[in-house]
Every structure is written in structure tokens, then in C-alpha cells.
Image (cartoon, helix red, strand yellow):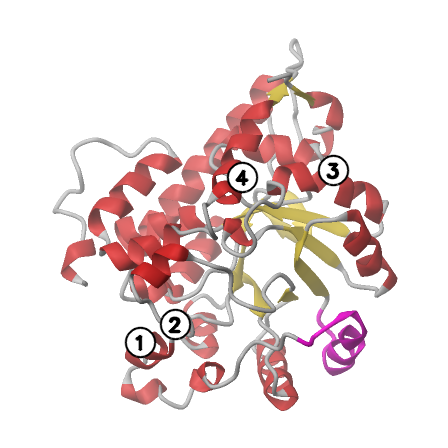
Amino acid sequence: EGDEIESEPGGPEMPLVCLTDFQAYAQEHLSKSTWDFIEGGADECFTRDDNIAAFKKIRLRPRYLRDVREVDTRTTIQGEEITVPICIAPTGFHCLVWPDGEMSTARAAQAAGICYITSTYASCTLEDIVATAPRGLKWFQLYVQSDRQLNKQVVQKAESLGFKALVITVDTPKIGNRRCDFRNKLDLQMNLLLKDLRSPKERNSMPYFQMCPIDSSFCWNDLSWLQSITRLPIILKGILTKEDAELAVKHNVHGIIVSNHGGRQLDDVPASIDALTEVVAAVKGKMEVYLDGGIRTGNDVLKALALGAKCVFLGRPILWGLAYKGEHGVEEVLNLIKNEFHTSMTLTGCRSVAEIHQDLVQFSRL
């Protein structure tokens, strides 16, 4: 597969000018099973597609005749400054699309000055990821395993390596019904992948996750145990309702990522952008709320922020960039959407992220 994903000398003739151009390139150059694994959703992929379509039901209300010579895209998440409110969501197995895998992703995030959430199912060791991008802001995503000791070990390792937050994925007590992977007979536990992706020197690093199923009994009351073993702020990823948002406040977590797992878990749930408003209203400013799912343009970022997200996270588009040119492909994707967002801010009259308010958007009557 390695040969298939190298870009031709000098790259393709046409420049890639939007995120979906990178998608087309990746589809052409990755093996079918890898492409289906990345792009697949649950069941009929309705929610996966709705994540993107829902943004198109929102219109912008631009304000003009403002001095927009200087537009500042910087913001903070959990007190740490980022150059733009566009960061990298956790996705697994980056070595499937580029030989250096997560090391390339981490370097691109560091160069861009944004946060990279490293997945439990990273195909590189946490040590290698940190060593290759020591100055980058990194959070660690945890799938809670049945073995408590194992969770404790990996959480404390992440904390000692300098990861700044712990992101708990809550929407995966069981893997969703991903038809493409079943058709391709892809082993959903990824046991073989995890073994294949490890060079001999890495054999003892983190393959323990392949033995342990995700803990489907983990619930709200178990959060206090996690809080007792780490000083890291805890972010819950996968919240879609006001009821769960209120429980998150009650249990003193530090943030929520409104997410439906890119439409990969339960189909027929709301698009992330449609679930955002009720979650933001429910937390009443007591914690930061973020969003992933369906972000493809600078306008999408602007709309999410106008509706109350502090920052958005990109999943699949990062993998498309990685498939294009590794670290430099991810940097290109980030720079592209960063520039689009700067344009969106300028053309709507927002000179800073603080000026992005709800009166910037309206829902169209489609």
C-alpha cells in the first residue's frame, strides 16, 4: 500500500484548493478497504452525510463598513492559546494512510499552532508522538477499557508525557454498525492492524488495548474514579443532548465535544451542528463546548462558533491531508481552512473571535 499513496513527483497538475479536493485525492490513492474504513458511517450513513448538509441550512448575516484590516483568529482552549479555533479530532491508525502516521500529524499540528487529540488507537507510541513534536499542544483521547489498572497506566503515562487534557469518548459502549467494514471483512477490533503496525522495537509499547474490550459498563458515577487518578481536565466527547450536558456540569467535567463520532456510531442522531445549540444552552457557560463533525469550510467554522462552540475539531479531512503528503499535506489542509476562516471573519465584519456572535447566523427555511 505504501507505493499507492506517494504523490507523483511535483504532485498532481491541479492545485488542491478546498478540503474536498483532498478527499478526492485520498479516495484515488488509498486502498479500497482503507478508504471505506475512514469514510464509512453507521447503517445508511444518514448522520454522516447530514453532518455536512446541516451546515448548508444555516445562512450568514454579514456586517459591513467595519475596519477589518486586522483580523485576529487566535483563541484559547482550556486556557492554552491556539492560532485558530480549528484543531485535530482523535482518529485511529494514521499509519494506514501515511508511513509515519501520527508522528506526521503531531508535527503538522505543532507547526500550525493548534491542538492535536491523540487517539487511544494511535499506531505510533505516545512517546514517539511527543518526541517528534515536543512543543505542540496535545490532548489524549481514552476509550475506557474494562481493566481499571490499564486505564490508570495509560492516563498517567499521557499526563507524565505532557498531554494537557483527557478526552473520554462516551458514545462507544459498543462499535457501531459499519456496513462497509463488514463487507470488507475488516476486523473491527483491529487486532491484526495493531500487530502489523508495530515494528519489533515497539512490540511492548501499547498493544495491550487489543486485548481489552471497551468497558460498556462505564457510567457517570465512574467519572469520579477517573478524576481521582489524574490532575488533567476531563473533556467528554460524544454528548448530543441537554440532559447529558447537564449531567456533565453536575459531574464537574471541564468540557464537552458535541459529536456523533462522524456518523460512525449511531445513525439517525442529529447532525453535530444541530445538537450544538441545546448543549450550549444547557451548560450555561460553566464549561467550554467544542464541536466535531461536518466541518469542511471556513464558513462552517464561523457558523459553529456563532452557535456557541469555542473551537471545532477536524477528523476525516486530516486523514485526507495525511494521505496526500503526510505532515505537509496536513499542514496544507490546516492552512487552507485557516485562510478560509480568516476570509469568513473578514467578510462578515468580525475582527476577533470574541466578535463572533449568534446574530451572525440565521436558519434558512428550506
**Is residue 165 at least partly visible in the picture?**
no
Q: Which residues are magenta?
A: 217-232
Amino acid at the residue labelled 4: Asn
Left or right of 28? Residue 36 is right
Q: Is residue 226 magenta?
A: yes
| Residue 293, position as x, y percentages in the image | 54, 45
Q: Nearer the viewer, residue 269 or 342?
A: 269
**Is residue 203 at least partly visible in the picture?**
yes
Give how far apart the Cα atoms at labels 2 and 3 are: 35 Å
Q: Nearer the viewer, residue 93 or 131?
A: 93
Q: Is residue 88 magenta?
A: no
Marks 1 and 3, the one that precedes in the sequence: 1
What residue did someone put label 3 on? 277
**Label 2 element class:** loop
Amino acid at the residue labelled 3: Thr
**Label 3 element class:** helix
**Label 1 element class:** loop
- Mark 1 closeness class: few <14, some 14–19, many ≥20 residues within 10 Å: many
Whether residues under marks 2 and 1 lie with C-beta atoms below 8 angstroms apart, the answer is yes
User: Which residue is located at x 74 percent, y 22 percent?
Assistant: 359
What residue did someone put label 1 on? 197
Amino acid at the residue labelled 2: Ser
Amino acid at the residue labelled 1: Leu
Whether residues under marks 2 and 3 lie with C-beta atoms below 8 angstroms apart, the answer is no
- Mark 4 closeness class: few <14, some 14–19, many ≥20 residues within 10 Å: many
Q: How many marks?
A: 4
Marks 2 and 3, the one that precedes in the sequence: 2
